[in-house]
Amino acid sequence: MASFVLSPPARKRSRRSRWSAAALAVALLGAGFDVVAGAPDVALAASTPDPDCSVTVAPDEAAAAELAAECGVPVEALSERTEYEQVLVDPAGTQTLTVAAVPQRVRRDNGSWADVDPTLSVVGGSVRPAATLADVRFSTGGSGPMATWQVGDDSFTLSWPLGALPAPRLVGATAVYDAVLPGVNLHVTALREGFSHAVEILTPAAAANPQVRSLRYVMGGTVRVEPDADGGLRLVEPDGEVVATTHAASMWDSSLDPTNAGDVQPARDGPREEAEPATGAEPGITSRRTDVGVEIDDTDLTVLVDETMLDDPEVTWPVFVDPPFNGLRSKWAYANNANKNWDVGNRAWVGRNSYDNVLYRSFFDFNISTLRHAETTVLSAKVTMVLDHSWSCDPTAVHLYRTNTDGITVSSGARMNWSTRPLPSSHWLDSWSGNANEAGGCGTIQPDATAVFEGNTLKNDVQARARASATTYTVGLCACNSSGEYESSQNRWKKFFTNKTYLVVTYDRKPNAPVALAFSATTDCYKACTSPAVVRTTTPTLRANVSDPYNGNLRTTFEVRTSASASATLVAGNASAPTTTAAPGTASWRVPSGLANGSTYYWRAQSKDENNLTGSWSGWQTLGVDTTPPVVSSVSSAQYPLREWGAVFGTSGTFALAGGSDVADFTWSVNSGSATTVAASGTNPKTASVTHNPTKDMVSTLSVVAKDIAGNTSQTYLHQFWVSPVPNKYARWKLDEASGSTAADSGSGGSAPSPATLSGQVSFVPGYLGNAASFTGTGGEITTSGPVLDTTKSFTVMAWVRASDLAAHDHQVALSQDGTQASRFQLMYNKDANGGAGGWCFAMRAADGGNSTTACADGAAWGLPADGSWVHVAGVYDTVAGKIRVYVMGDPLDCGGETAETAFSADWSATGAFAIGRGLSSGAAANRWRGEIDDVYAFQRTLSAREICLQAIQ
């Protein structure tokens, strides 16, 4: 049996790398993902609110912990998976690391994983294994190489030089080329990390062939073959890197004699069961075996068989001869007291070999880098193996030790010197007794047995090595007890499967220190909610974010003390009944009693997980208790004093608020309207200044409430003030003159008269109420010598109008007041309103020459503007409400009509003339009126709809 295997590469792993759901789904669904060898395929759950609990893998430890907690099943963290290792996150918040001594799975080029599967099939013109760690392919027949191993850009080939190969029979992992010589078959077998090959000699006649007694193969490719010091071979790339190793060659027959491999007990009822026969892949349990010689000459590899075995009349045919390519990349080794290389057939041998009475021990390396963390606590540990064969028909003991020095010292699967890792060592771990005799001497073929080495000694030893930051945990298997006895006892001879040897460690890490959260502003605090916090209750609720590296349920203890010291007086705590929280989450506990007003306390929190691992305390948090409400001491205002007539309506007032030294802010409102909160300033008293523009005259009440940093509120302080009504100040141009160039102002309310001057094409004609001014649109206008309205304050303008030619111009202004470049407001006809149908509008500009904001009636009730009809139009600017409005009326018997409004606020003061019959744009008269205008009003206040209506029903 010959085999090539890859040397182990440097181990690389990415901790907590997060895969995208799409990429992971492709990997799982496209390639088939096994949690452990032989498990059914699984797929990643989609990112949905409800987890898919049929899934047993997640991208990383955090996602696995979340899924495990939600579904109550162990979940594998794919970020931790390697050829040898996997980590399962348990629902209880622990993790279980399983490390194999032999690669268990293969990572494909697309990033997906597959269990090692050497089963052969024809793919792309060659025979290939399904999934192994070596890129090997075998011949489908013909004169080419029987085996090719591709290693990056380099390759190694091995050819049968004695004629073309027939098409092979594929039997599992083995390709059998029949009759390559008379009575001789060639077997080529795919291994986990390479390949093996053996010649099957069927008869003595075939064995007589000189070509069989000196088997020659031809090597090729860029990878060269070199002998090593122990009699094996190694494959070396051109750059000097060793990519494969081989061990000693051997030959074996097909004997089924049970005495070759174990006890033979007296015959029991019925015939004896026989052992499994030898194959080209490996000897049978009962095969007779011997080693063979190998010679290398340039490209020739020659195997010199043991002619004594071939000529022995007692040999059982067929006989198999393997060239010396046999070995694994796996992390195990053997030693024997003869320091002799031997093909151990991928088995861990222990005890006295029945072939030559040599003592054997086996050693295994397990990577424990995952456990290298100061917080790791090992909860349990075991080494499991599967016993393939024992000499004895009854249980006998085998002992497990940790070697005194970490690490095997040879290429994987090879032999160490007997003295390199002495056994028994000073670190005995456990013993196990069992049997699995497959030779047939026990009457039946005994089944394989699972050996489990466990207990506190092993657990504590793994813990110690993890705490010492060891990366490798090396164990040795010996038939000897801790005193070095019984190793030579034949009945302790055993063979274990190396590919079924595991270190299984369940571990945990203590919870993270809780992270204190702010108190609730709703129930406990106001301005000082984090340390140093001040609360307004003697029973506040303490809260902290709790978490654990592996989630699970945490029990959190809170404690409150008189100072930031563990030895200070304990005021309150919940140690007897901790809060249980699923991690990550928020733990909370309400202090039942014990806190006093005016005192300062210190609190902290600590979590414990389901395995009673206790995390660190959080930092101390300072907590002050203040349940005393603040006081509003006074409210004063120069404009609106307490219970006295104050400023005229429309005048803004300033109110000075004052309170005690503990006031944080004041909240005020007028007449139960919307409340406004302002911060207090100063020291003692705390003060604030607020401004209010009354929305109505007569009696109003300012309500003030103070609040301190804890959230305590004062009683409501009431300041009643009286707003003096605004005199009915207005200008009125009746336009009843019969002739002349002046329009008289007959307004009242204390305003100075503002007579207006006629200019251009304007005249007096019969109107709606007496006479009216008539405009032709060719230059006529009526203007005052200066402003009539303070356009920074509320005002109302209105007039009766009758258009004579709306089609002559899209924009025709009845009333306006000039700025420097443009009108501040315009009461007008606007052709663009109502989708181009036209409408009565009131427009204002926020800045001189800027764009207008317009409110237009839609005509639904009153109708759209039309030539020849008298209509009463009004425009209102309401600074308190921040709106402009337009009113369209004119029924002498009804106040019905139309109104429209839009938001507007700007304090630009237009100081030019009040104009009747035109607007102003770009510093020049524009948008002239065509028709009549009668009875014009300008009020320095907001008129209600009813007040406007009283003018419109005349």
Image (cartoon, helix red, strand yellow):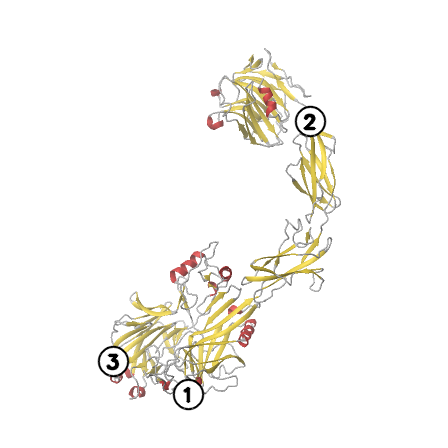
Give the residue drawn at x 47%, y 70%.
Answer: 98
The residue carrying mark 3 is 183
Query: Label 3's element?
Result: loop
Nearer the viewer's eye, disc 3 or disc 2?
2
Query: Looking at the image, is mark 1 or mark 2 earlier in the sequence?
Result: 1
Circle 1/circle 2 CB separation < 8 Å: no
Q: Position of residue 302 (x, y in %)?
A: 32, 81
Amino acid found under the numbered disc labelled 3: Gly
Answer with the quarter of the image where residue 306 lies: bottom left
Q: Position of residue 254 (x, y in %)?
A: 32, 82
Query: Looking at the image, is mark 3 or mark 1 earlier in the sequence?
Result: 3
The residue carrying mark 1 is 357
Give the residue drawn at x 56%, y 69%.
Answer: 377
Task: Examine the rendered structure and indicate whether residue 665 appears above or below residue 364.
Answer: above
In the displayed structure image, the side of residue 484 where residue 104 appears, left or right: left
Label 2: few (<14), some (14–19) or many (≥20) C-alpha neighbours in 10 Å: some
Q: Nearer the viewer, residue 72 or 429?
A: 72
